[in-house]
Image (cartoon, rainbow, N blue to C red):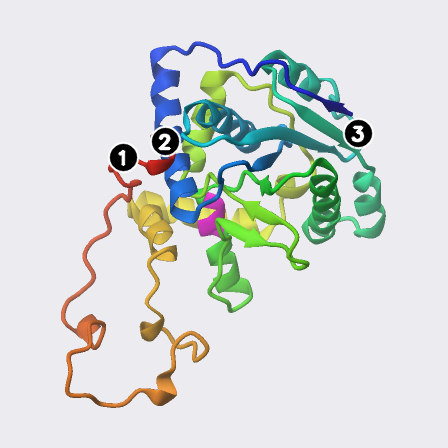
């Protein structure tokens, strides 16, 4: 089911909501500018699950669409996985009331996952593959140039530690990703946004949240254990999550051990100063401080 837009409605906000929206617009605008997530003439397919993150993403992109110096289109897409008890009328009603064009795709991935994954095992691997395939197909059918997902800063940090602890790889979630076949670009405009800010914004805006008993609701997820670990760490050392998030975009390959990222074998002594050299020996790392997006004017929002 696809519904075109008539006129997007941006409701008036109270002071607290407007302040949070301004903050989120600044952070999302910074991510868009830093990684060139949205460009002139793009048609952005916003994946809307009915959770706080995707609602927040869509809402902020609608605001930026009206403020940005470039023209781009938005279409909200929901993949109805035929989850028992899913209130299928909620999203169409909300999107119609906002005047946002949308497409609802009904595909029974829920029963496939439940049938193939034994009880007690996590469903993420199969569920995400099924969803991804359908979303790529829908993007092609709709002519979307970008696919926007609602992963936020905390998702990125948690994924970094998941890979550190369980796969032995130093990787997280990128703000921009090209599909294997090269035909699709996936973007994550919430890359600089904290989950707590999205939760607060969802509360202030009164989004009609739809619960899900797939994915993150599973109690035995390693991701949940990592989340608890990071929350405890943040309580003991406030600001550490900000530092970790900043570190993901401030990498020094010469001070790691991956020969594919830095040519250690060709490293020889020289008679000239080397900027990165052995500066790590000079001092202890400075205490971490909360990392905020740049206070400079953001080109995307001018």
Q: Which residue matches tag 1?
A: 297
Question: Distance of mark 1 from mark 3, alpha carbons?
Answer: 46 Å
- Circle number at residue 84: 3
Residue at 55 percent across and 66 percent down: it is 167
Q: Which residue is mark 2?
A: 301
Mark 2 or mark 3, earlier in chain:
3
Question: Which of pointers 1 and 3 lies earlier in the amino acid sequence?
Answer: 3
Marks 2 and 3, how far apart at CA: 41 Å
Q: Indicate which label's residue lies in the foreground, 1 or 3.
A: 1
Secondary element at image label 1: loop
**CA separation in Å, label 1 and label 2:** 8 Å
Query: Element type at marker 2?
Result: helix
Q: Is residue 217 above or below residue 156?
A: above
User: Label 1: few (<14), some or many (≥20) within 10 Å?
Assistant: few
Majority secondary structure of the magenta segment?
Answer: helix
Residue at 67%, 21% in the rendered image: 91
Residue 172 picture location, percent across and down: 49, 56
Give the residues drawn in magenta, as a range.
Answer: 154-158
Q: Nearer the viewer, mark 2 or mark 3?
A: 2
83 to 118, vertically: above or below? above
Is the N terminus in the top left, top right, bottom left or bottom right quadrant?
A: top right
Judge by depth and name the residue closer to the eye, 175 or 165: 175
User: Could you tell me which secondary element the residue under label 3 belongs to?
Assistant: loop
Q: Is residue 51 visible?
A: no
**Residues at marks 1 and 3 touching, judged by CB atoms closer than 8 Å:** no
Residue 286 falls within the magenta-colored stretch: no
Do tag 1 and tag 2 residues touch (Cβ < 8 Å)? Answer: yes
| Quadrant in the rendering for residue 18 | top left
């Amino acid at each position: 089911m696809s519904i075109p837009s008539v006129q997007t409605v941006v409701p008036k906000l109270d002071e607290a909501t407007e302040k949070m929206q301004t903050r989120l617009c600044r952070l999302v605008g910074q991510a868009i500018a830093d990684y060139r997530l949205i460009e002139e003439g793009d048609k952005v397919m916003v994946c809307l699950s009915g959770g706080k993150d995707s609602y927040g993403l869509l809402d902020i992109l609608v605001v930026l669409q009206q403020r940005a110096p470039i023209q781009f289109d938005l279409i909200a897409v929901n993949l109805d996985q035929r989850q028992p008890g899913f209130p299928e009328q909620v999203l169409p009603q909300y999107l119609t009331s906002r005047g946002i064009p949308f497409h609802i795709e009904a595909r029974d991935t829920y029963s496939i996952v439940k049938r193939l994954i034994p009880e007690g095992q996590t469903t993420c691997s199969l569920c995400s593959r099924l969803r991804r395939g359908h979303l790529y197909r829908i993007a092609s059918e709709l002519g979307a140039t970008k696919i926007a997902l609602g992963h936020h800063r905390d998702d990125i940090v948690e994924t970094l530690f998941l890979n550190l602890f369980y796969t032995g790889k130093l990787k997280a979630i990128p703000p921009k990703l090209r599909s294997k076949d090269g035909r699709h670009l996936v973007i994550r405009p919430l890359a600089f946004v904290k989950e707590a800010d999205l939760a607060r914004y969802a509360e202030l805006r009164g989004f009609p949240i739809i619960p899900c008993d797939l994915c993150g609701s599973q109690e035995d997820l390693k991701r949940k254990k990592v989340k608890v670990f990071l929350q405890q760490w943040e309580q003991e050392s406030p600001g550490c999550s900000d530092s970790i998030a900043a570190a993901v975009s401030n990498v020094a390959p010469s001070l790691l051990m991956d020969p594919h990222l830095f040519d250690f074998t060709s490293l020889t002594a020289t008679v000239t100063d080397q900027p990165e050299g052995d500066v790590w020996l000079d001092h202890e790392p400075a205490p971490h401080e909360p990392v905020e997006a740049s206070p400079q004017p953001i080109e995307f929002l001018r």
